[in-house]
Image (cartoon, coloured by chain):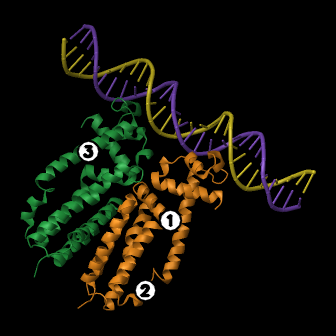
Chain colours: A green, B orange, C purple, D yellow
Amino acid sequence: MNTKHRILDEALTLFAQKGYANVYVGEIAEKVGIKAPSLYKHYKNKQAIFDAIIDEMNKRYEKQAGALNISGMNPSADASVYSSISEDKLVEIGTGLFLYFLHDDYTSRFRKILTIEQFHNKEFANIYTSQYVDGPISYQKMLFQFMVASGAFNHADVDLMTLQFYAPIYMLLTLCDREPDREAEALEMLEKHFRQFSKIYGDTQ
Amino acid sequence: MNTKHRILDEALTLFAQKGYANVYVGEIAEKVGIKAPSLYKHYKNKQAIFDAIIDEMNKRYEKQAGALNISGMNPSADASVYSSISEDKLVEIGTGLFLYFLHDDYTSRFRKILTIEQFHNKEFANIYTSQYVDGPISYQKMLFQFMVASGAFNHADVDLMTLQFYAPIYMLLTLCDREPDREAEALEMLEKHFRQFSKIYGDTQ
DNA sequence: ATTGACGGCTAATTTGAATTAGCTTACAAT
DNA sequence: ATTGTAAGCTAATTCAAATTAGCCGTCAAT
């Protein structure tokens, strides 16, 4: 990892903790182990660092979207796998989603920036909603639609089913972003939630 | 509303949109219709304005807590009212909670400040969690406990029941904070959620 | 061996926002 | 009528942080 990259990395961490305006370029430089003016050899100014973070994020999201078209993002492919889904499998899917969102190195820091800047910047608000509300919901909705169609799940309002499945994941995710200590508690609740969900909607008749 | 109050009010609005560091005192002054230096006749400095907002919020929360001890916050009193809760009543409670959180003039702006500052300031993280996660959940948990005890609801894991009841409210609340346009859609989903919830847990056997 | 780009440094300089100084008017109380 | 205080203003001043200037060592390529 070269200096230019390390600047991006430290800046991302600091912006995620304090927000753009509260971070001084000297602070970023210090974390990287150089002096503030040296930083300008790599980026035109503070804003350019921020912009580079956005670019990097867009690149990652595109790559991720590409990758997910093969497995995660294309539920018609997944559906066959889950057409007779077990309770344990549901726990695994849900927990996996939660832990990925929570711990992925880049994603988790960037989510905090989105959180901090969402009311300030319409662009960020849109990204936030699409990444953490509409995106997961629309993916899972498709998955559940297949599962209902295949008989793995009882017939029910799929929008509602999806909301009820995902909202606890979302709430506990934002809780753990704020209070990382509570991850174990959150995982425990989540597992109970998934099992209950499976009992309610799973076709055990 | 005198000038001192209007300063507080405009500052609250601006801090809720941009966060503390992005708001200039001149900007607050302009909204109030005075020049920046005049503002110092009312508050020692920018920080003092922010502190006054916190004080005001604490005052309101205490007052609210006091009021809720009579109705909202003491579920043993409420429980008799809801001991044989109807589906419509559940919709009403849930929707009421949601709309209060979303639109209360002071609360809604302050929640945005909490959102923006939560990763920067441990104090705010604690207030956020207690106001929008642990608080509502612990209240509703007590309510559900009484309702299970009284037979209005089927026996079930009350923690889980509460999570599943509240998480959609929370997620849609944060969505509407970010995208106020989507309130109608959120209310529609919520109503479906409450009715479904009532069918799942309500004792209709 | 020389050259030139890269990436670091220290020491300015610039910038912009917060704050202070000091003046003015209105007006309430003596 | 005089005085004191509250609340506004314009014109400084301060201060911190961003940015620029200009110097230096390293090293890879000619």
3D distance between C-alphas at marks 3 and 2:
50 Å
- The reply to whether the C-beta atoms of the residues labelled 3 and 2 are less than 8 Å apart is no
The quarter of the picture where residue B94 lies is bottom left
On-image quarter of the N terminus of chain A: top left
Q: Secondary structure at mark 1?
A: helix
Q: Secondary structure at mark 3?
A: helix
Q: What's under tag 2, amino acid-wise?
A: Asp
Image: B69 above or below A160: below
- The reply to whether the C-beta atoms of the residues labelled 3 and 1 are less than 8 Å apart is no
3D distance between C-alphas at marks 3 and 1:
36 Å
Q: Earlier in the sequence, mark 2 or mark 1?
A: 2
Read off the chain for label 2: B
Q: Is residue A44 left or right of residue D5?
A: left
Which residue is disc 2 drawn over?
B78
User: Of the numbered discs in the image, which one, if any, rests on residue A58?
Assistant: 3
Question: x, y (%) of residue B106?
Answer: 51, 64
Q: What's under tag 1, amino acid-wise?
A: Asp
Mark 2 vs mark 1, foreground winner is 1
Observer-nearest of A154 and A28: A154
Which residue is disc 1 drawn over?
B105
Q: Callout 1 environment at 10 Å: few (<14), some (14 to 19), or many (20+)?
A: few
> So how many labels did they put on this image?
3
Residue B137 visible in the displayed image: yes
Q: Callout 2 environment at 10 Å: few (<14), some (14 to 19), or many (20+)?
A: some
Q: Is residue C26 left or right of residue C30?
A: left
Read off the chain for label 3: A
The quarter of the picture where residue B9 lies is bottom right
Q: Is residue A149 left or right of residue B184?
A: left
3D distance between C-alphas at marks 2 and 1:
26 Å
